Image: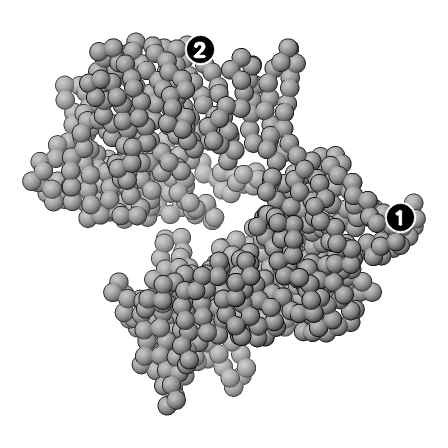
Amino acid sequence: MYDCDGQLLGEHPSFTAQYEFGNYVLGCDFSTNEYIMFDVDTMATVWTVSDWLYLTDANDLLSWETADGQGIVTDLMLNPKLKEADWLAQNAEWEPNGTKISIVCENKQTGEVIISLIENQEGSSIYHYYACDSQYNITEELPKEFIDTYYEDDTRVPLTYQITADGLLTITNFWTKETIVTASVDLQGGEVSYIDVTNAGPMYGVTINTINPNNIVTLLISNGTVISESRGHTVLQENVVNLDEDTIVVYENGTNPNTLYFNANGEPLIEQDTNAIYADRYAVCTMQNGKLCITPRGQFAYNLPIAEDEYLVLTTGEGSYNWLGGDMVLALDSSGEEVLRLPGYGITGNSAYISNGMIVDENTPLVLYTGYEDGAADDSDYASAQMGIYSLKDRKWIVEPARQSVTLFSDSVYMIGSDVGNLYRIDGTCIEEGAEDVTVQGNFIISRRAVYDKTGQLLIMIQENENVLTVLCDEILINEYFSDGSHYTKCVNAQGETIWIEQSGLTWTGGEAGWRIYNSWNDMNEKGLLTATRDDNTLKIVLSEDEFFAKNPDAQGNGLRLLTVTANNEGRHEFFLQTTSAEHQKIYYYRCDDEFNIINAYPQNQIYIGNMYDEVCLWYWGLDESGNGFVENLIWGNKIKVDAEIMNEILQCSDVQVIQEGNIFGLLFDQNKKFLYGTDNDTHLISENGKIMARMASQSNTGAAGVDILSIAYAEKEYSEILYYLADGTMLDGYGTILFMNEQMKCVQEVGRIVIRDSMGNVRKEIDMIPGSKGQKADASLLARGFLNS
């Protein structure tokens, strides 16, 4: 088995992979008829079963036929969820008929399911379908006019249909009761055998099979209108699929096979009298007068490879971590037209990546500044600069530049002021005066007095003695302290409704929202304990500090605290816990099973705690039993190999930082003078006399570069230089300074101009700089570099 990059994941003597369930793959060894579930991350065998026959699946439920011909439904870990005999007895009053019980559809929102039984009758099989509640109690038996082959977003959805006497066909989503297809059909007296439905966007393909095999009727429907109908064997099936987010393809199998192409709105991309070759989101390919014609589509029909509602924003000149450049700001739309040129301005506040460019959509405001004085302290930059907010969509200033601090918290909310200021919506409406300690946490904007959503809508008022502790997913933890020293902690939802409250004097120290909302606390004696939220939203103590040390007598420290919760290959919880020793100034890290027995203990100088995709992550490095170096993401379970000599050097460092993007790891060590990065296949080391700032590139277009590219700035040189490296260690060098780069384009500042090339190296745009402007400030060094290199 390989991943999509061709990396070998694992081998088995005789294994055919059949079905994928997230990180798990179900396959069969047909030489022994043994089914095997593998963990894709580790390629470890999760379980095997040899005397069952796989029937079907619905979400994470697997249906099987056992050796005695009975049916059974299990979860992915092969734990029984439903047994045929038990279900028949549970629903005896309905007198269900058949064997080989299967769950064919599951409603994830309600827990309702569709269960099927097979009745063998005179050499044929008759399927019976039953709608059941979340406890598998039958609520109704479905009519024979039932469709179980329809999928939406890879999830099977049950449909029912009706054909009236005058030939009106209606097809209805059984869960939502929404009619998705209405059409008139003439079956010419034929009786329906079964109906297949496929869908993509506003288009449906309907294939009606009658008992007379020569009377197959197919319908192609777009936006509720039948645009094509066939009968007999001309079209045996209308198969409608999404080729990509912008393209729908209809495969018509039959006597005259045909392929039709439509856009996401269900409109044809190719005229009927044109010989279609291929179409996708990039281009439409046709044969015209014996010649191949390729016509770019959508964003790719424009001069720049960005979407129609996006802008490329570039800033030239010197920059630093937050201030990306102060010589000039340029913005171009998808056609390549220059919509903004501001000499003497720079950008700040929109990007967390080290870059001199970014792609933003039309609703993203730009925080711009001018008049920045070199050498101004970071916390007083605004005092020496004029800052404002500009709207590319409206081509005007939302906030006129002035000597003020401007902070953008979302596309809709900003603040004027530093530690204390007024909070505004982007339309200029003031939503809070004198706002203090404003931060963005999760989906919320939180001040000292209120909680807002990212549009600026007020959600919760914070009372006088309250303060927001943190945000766990979409839930908010709030503390309130009283004059007598007592306090409580409550968890509220986005509507301000209390989910639970803790008022026995415990102090919250950590939480994890992904499983059962586990939280850790300190009692009055500074001893830690863990709680879990019951179904009735009350807190249950699941572990005290004394219990932890009784279970684990070799553990050290005190003040037990929860870091995060994950799951092992068997789906069982594992807890990452922390204790501290004030006496020895040490922190101890432990990985525990679901009964809080220590599995691994980790030294303080070999653990880094950070965030990855807004979740707590732990990285561990060291030497394995064979003396080989490694760095491992303990939460994701992936790791890279590191040269033993380099790892021994890393182990001598007290301050090591880890960053990760996908399968690329990076370690910053030796007082930030060395940076090790790479994948499991290969790692590379960069050393500098000055400090290194490093950022992994984002998968999105807002990052400094595209997939698998690093941005590294050397901040202690005479000027801040940005260099780009591929994951294989190749530095993207050449004449000029790279302002921005992603998968589709590369923007380079050369002498007197900016050149934008696409991924094939074709020049898509050349931008002349204004002679003598501040935009020329960096050109002297570029010219010297070009002369010395020649």
Instruction: Residue 573: name its quadrant.
Output: bottom left
Residue type for callout 2: Asn
**Separation of marks 1 and 2 at Cα, in angstroms:** 62 Å
Q: Position of residue 335 (x, y in %)?
A: 67, 37
Q: Position of residue 76 (x, y in %)?
A: 33, 46
Residue 130, placed above or below residue 349? above
- Is residue 672 shown left or right of residue 374? left
Residue at 15% x, 41% y is 138
Residue 730, placed above or below residue 99? below
Residue type for callout 1: Gly
List the residue tagged with mark 2. 256
Residue at 64% x, 19% y is 293
**Quadrant position of the C terminus in the picture:** top right
Q: Nearer the viewer, residue 635 or 557?
A: 635
Numbered disc 1: secondary structure? helix
List the residue tagged with mark 1. 786
Residue 202, placed above or below residue 380? above
Does residue 703 show up? Answer: no
Instruction: Residue 695: name its quadrant.
Output: bottom right
At label 2, counting other C-alpha atoms closer than 10 Å, the crowd grade (few under 14, some 14-19, many 20 or more) is few
Numbered disc 2: secondary structure? loop
Q: Nearer the viewer, residue 482 or 25?
A: 482
Mark nearer the N terminus (1 vs 2): 2
Residue at 61% x, 71% y is 417
Instruction: Residue 72: name its quadrant.
Output: top left
Does residue 749 show up? Answer: yes
Q: Position of residue 788 (x, y in %)?
A: 92, 50
